[in-house]
Image (cartoon, coloured by chain):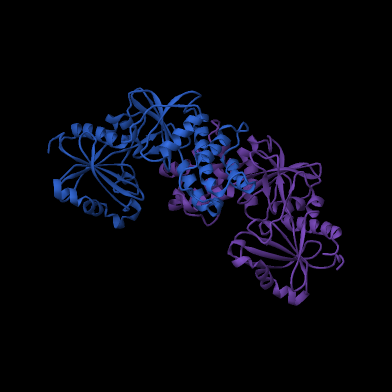
Chain colours: A blue, B purple
Amino acid sequence: MTLDVTRLRIILDWGTTSFRALLVTPDGTVRDRIETEEGIQSVREGDFLGVLQRAIAPWRAAYGFLPVYAAGMIGSRNGWIEMPYVPTPADSRDLAAQVKNLPLPDGGTITFLPGLTDRSAHPFPDVMRGEETQLVGFGLDKDITVVLPGTHAKWARIAGRRIAAFQTLVTGEIFSTLSRHSFLSKVARRPATSNWDAFLKGVALVRDDKRTAGLLTHLFAVRTGWLSGALVPEQMTDYLSGLVVASEFREAKALGWFTDGDRIAVVGDDDLVEVYERVAGAFGLSLEPAPEDAAVRGCLAVARIAEDIHPAA
Amino acid sequence: MTLDVTRLRIILDWGTTSFRALLVTPDGTVRDRIETEEGIQSVREGDFLGVLQRAIAPWRAAYGFLPVYAAGMIGSRNGWIEMPYVPTPADSRDLAAQVKNLPLPDGGTITFLPGLTDRSAHPFPDVMRGEETQLVGFGLDKDITVVLPGTHAKWARIAGRRIAAFQTLVTGEIFSTLSRHSFLSKVARRPATSNWDAFLKGVALVRDDKRTAGLLTHLFAVRTGWLSGALVPEQMTDYLSGLVVASEFREAKALGWFTDGDRIAVVGDDDLVEVYERVAGAFGLSLEPAPEDAAVRGCLAVARIAEDIHPAA
């Protein structure tokens, strides 16, 4: 099989709790998508192949064998195969050099992309799986800090046309576990629409705190705000959200990821982008535009190079 | 009924998830105890009276009516009656002046103790319910900072024979929700006995971090430590514990609750006291001895004054 740029490709976004397959044209246009709840943790007896084949059977029937590309947690220790981490600094060529092609028994090939590690991180090497394709899709041609919101948010530095360094902050995980399982969950009522006023009050509390208090201190304000009548239950989840994401920005600033007046980019494809952009604005940062389909663009960019390196795939 | 110092008293420790009643002599000796899982949140249709009467029926049969004292969350908005908060600075006399006696329909009386509020706290008044009796029981005669570990840990300053100020940090809540509901819970295996080595590694990470990173950054080290082979699953819960409690000490230091070389006290009656004392030691603090039964001592001290103020109870 030689490279045919006119061919369709399948890009997998197969995470811990969900399965998503995108049918894309070489220019990145998404022609079709299949989503199921068959996340990695629900796959029985390691039958990733079976789950994949059943999911994409309609495309197989319509188009024959299509090359499949998979980045992210499906290539982790708990996934299909454990892919290596490419060390920073790295660009799309470094990522493409480490892909692995797995022939599928009924024909066709799945290509796994590697993850990325920052060995300079303290105290242990930091890691990402999947976000590196978003960074490549965003573009590596300009020196800038990029934040990728998520369960484990990443702050990355693009410099010298490479991903130079990155750092994980567990903001989404903290917000999710606290809003579902803490003292908050008994009181807070999730609003129908985001309450940006309450959100920005939470942001301001953290941003303007001259005492360098931290998250353990600030979080109790969700409760004392309710007890004192300053917050009503409908506001508490948004207040918590503002407080937690602003804490991420405060930590990122302390760690040198940005300074006052910087221009940064927020890369992602869900509601969190707006949340992060509002916090960035509250911290006086300006925003570099970013495409919503950065993950697809990046995956295709790495795929194209990989197909040049391994044309027999 | 006049005050009879030889009489037994019942002290309730009735929290959100558990009910505990102590039968104590006037000198604070615990003669008997009854514990059930009938915490405030499990009481149906507000029948606190019924739960109490059924629980202490054996004592009622043996000793007749005994005065009952209740501090803590049973006197909160979600409890039996909502007690006021006495503002700091406050001593045992200020607390005793705000107790409320509720006659029980079949005879006897239950006396609720008020909570405590620090109106100088930022951004909303801080609150405690129950810990103020621990502080009184510890003693207010010496100027010192006292930390009370728990779901919502308190740092309090005793000065001028009063509780001068305090601050809540949600350390226990963060540890509990993360160890049960986060990425950790899928990997971490709780050790049979505490692994102090892993615990102190977590403490050191936070204490020695010159970059002023915060909790959102540090928490991911639990995962990267595992991925890099530096931590085995059995160590992860203790590493997390050290990391979170050390974060509390770091925030408390930033907020001025202690400075290098200070002497502080850790007041509580469970395993957390040892955990906190080890972190205090790691931060170079010396420890003032504290009694394990501070809550009982404090409740009785307030009760005695209240009985003088309201002898008809």
Image coordinates for residue B167, horizontal then vertical, percent: 66, 43
The mark total stands at: 0
Image coordinates for residue B172, horizontal then vertical, percent: 58, 50
- Vertically, is A186 above or below A250? below
Asked whether A66 or B44 is in front, the reply is B44
Image coordinates for residue A237, horizontal then vertical, percent: 51, 46
Q: Residue furthest bottom?
A: B61
Asked whether B291 or A305 is in front, the reply is A305
Q: Does residue B215 appear anywhere in the picture?
A: no
Q: Residue furthest left?
A: A1
Question: Is B96 placed left or right of B247 in the picture?
Answer: right
Q: Which quadrant holds the N terminus of chain B? A: bottom right
Image coordinates for residue B58, horizontal then vertical, percent: 71, 75
Question: Is B106 placed left or right of A221 in the picture?
Answer: right
Q: Which quadrant holds the C terminus of chain B? A: bottom right
Give the residue at x 64% y 64%: B19
